[in-house]
Image (cartoon, grey):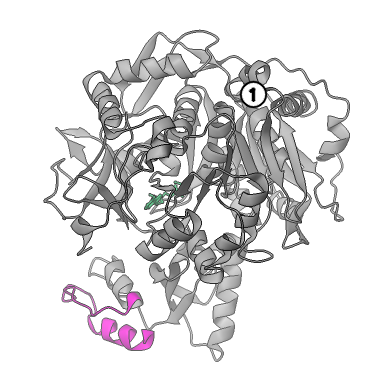
Amino acid sequence: MSDLHNRKVYHPNEEFAKNAAIKSMDEYRALQDEATNDYEGFWGRFAKEKLDWVEPFTNVLDESDFPFVKWFDGGKLNVSSQCIDRHLDARGDKTAILFEGDRGDVQKITYKELSKNVNKFANLLKEDFEVKKGDRVVIYMPMIPEAAYAMLACARIGAIHSIVFGGFSAEALKDRIQDAEAKVVITADGAYRKTKPYMLKPVVDTALEGETPVKKVLVVERNNEEINWVDGRDYSYHELIKNKSDVCAPEVMDSEDPLFLLYTSGSTGKPKGVQHNSAGYILWAQMTMEWVFDVKEDDVYWCTADVGWITGHTYIVYGPLAMGATTVMFEGVITYPDAGRPWKMVQDHKVNQFYTAPTAIRVLHKMGEHEPANYDVSSLKVLGTVGEPIDPPAWKWYYEEVGNSKCAIVDTYWQTETGGHVVSPLPGATPIKPACATLPLPGIMAEIIDEEGNTPELGEKGLMCITRPWPAMIRGVWGDKERFIKSYFGDVKKDGKPVYFTGDGAVYDKDGYITITGRTDDVINVSGHRMGTAEVEAAILKDDNVAEVAVVGKPHPLKGEGIFAYIALKSEVSDEEAEKKSINNIIKQEIGNIALCDHIIFVPGLPKTRSGKIMRRILRSIAKGEEITQDISTLEDPSIVEKIVAMAK
Ligand code: WT7
């Protein structure tokens, strides 16, 4: 970070800024001042302007039970109506979802068609599966339009969806189903990847073995491969949907009725079910679409995430549809058949905003540096990045080769728990710097502070916190009030009051710009996916021959971080490679391929303090190949460090 204060500044494209939602830093500051001076007034104004209320709210923010807060209390609405019904008159024939399949098949679903499909789906869930308001529905789906219909159908009838990313294993799916006590699973036979069919339904079958709260499984046929059907449990979507009415009155929901759960990793224990509620979430999803991506009526917007992650929730489905945009949904792999695929899609669909992760940018850069020039990508106006700190070379390539040095890059910093962006440039207003998330969005009181709430010295790392509740914030950890408080409000206080701590470190530069430096806890960021070290360790411990394990992140040129495991075996093995394979196999079964270890080394023991705490910091340094500068005299057996260093070479 030596050049932190001297990074090149890129000013917004002037032509673009003229029509932008927020046109200048003056406008940005005016909004942020408005929020600072009258926080509730600010949010109340936007909630009235942006949402269609069935009944108006009577109170903007209730903090009396902090950190359990209530936004827009008394208000009634339905999130699926926000995303569909209110657009039908003005833009019923506009494409809502522009789907491109893995094999290049394209489907354009208008708002009218979306309405019919979602209403039928909602009726199916109600009539055939007896899903009621408050019931949990697990969605384990590929990237096909039916995944969005399923989400919106749940929202329509007030059911709480919990999407599990299709790359998670049966065991991981089972854990999430049980924690949420889901009564229905919506899945597909499978889908296509690199033109070949792959399967999901068999994973669901395994996850439901033994005792399960799940009564019914709905299977969307996508690849029509042969699957197993369990009588009385499994039903074909295409069969059941046929005779459903395309009218389904939306359930009238309270502002604070839960909308969805999404499981994410923490530094300890099992993944936690992050709960988002209705009004505050959808308000911020829509506002950030307008402010950060600056989507206009005729624009085509594409986010490459998977619906299984929060980015897919907020910025493929809820945000774009709430504002009436055309959102691209892509089933395939962005580097297939070659690294020109996304640029061909930008050309074919005239994409105006493109949003992806640094790991994808690095891969596209490496595999197809000059591919963007082979296509007409001149429709692009805003480029987004999310999920991990982006490195300056990848940023530069994105800016110059993809954006032709005329598009703003919005480096959007946020988390599953924040619901939507919290720190990000505004494309028509904020002068940007490479690899820098810049400034808090208007209305978000994001600050870098230390544990006592003081601002760190210039250039010193601090903790990325949000000092006031915001509408899209996490409302709870499903079934675990204590964990919610401890995970997010336990570490940092400002003016004596606990504030939300993100788990990330960050640093201000001389202009007050925020640069995120990465997690300060035991969470690893692999290709923009959050992995808890505790979860990976728990999986590895299932191997009978493993005595002890510690995993840490190791910087990886494409993935951001890779997983490095230090393992002490109970007894020596003759074939270390076979043992490593079997350990990765267990991880695959317990979590999924996303958590496979890049490096495994077998060590005689782990560096522990006398109280038995593993010194992960030392292991991180060893994984990076750094000199060990930490004090190791407090270790139970300091000689172990030298041994491990030698083995890791
Ligand atoms: C963690 C959240 C937010 C959607 C995707 C990931 C890291 C996210 C940035 C960014 C640096 C970032 C943080 C954060 N992160 N965006 N622009 N710059 N780091 O959601 O799985 O909840 O992960 O991703 O470490 O805490 P998630």
* Disc 1 packing (10 Å; few <14; some 14–19; many ≥20): many
Residue at the farthest left position = 457
**Which residue is located at x 64 percent, y 59 percent?**
341
| Image spot of residue 63 (x, y percent) | 31, 21
Towards the viewer: 142 or 254: 142
Q: Which of the two residues, 330 or 579, is positioned nearer the viewer here?
A: 330
Which segment did they paint magenta? 624-649
Q: Is residue 2 left or right of residue 197?
A: left
Q: Return the residue at label 1.
A: 84
Secondary element under disc 1, as helix, strand or loop, is: loop
Any part of residue 614 in sight: no
**Residue 442: in sight, yes or no?**
yes
**Residue 587 place in picture, x, y as percent:** 56, 66
Q: Residue 605 is drawn in which quadrant?
A: bottom left
Looking at the image, residue 97 sits to the left or right of residue 258; the answer is right
Is disc 1's CB within 8 Å of ligand 1?
no
Q: Is residue 456 above or below residue 248?
A: below
Quarter containing the N terminus: bottom left
Please determine whether, in this image, residue 305 is positioned above or below residue 392: above
Q: Is residue 84 magenta?
A: no
| Residue at 19% across, 51% down | 509
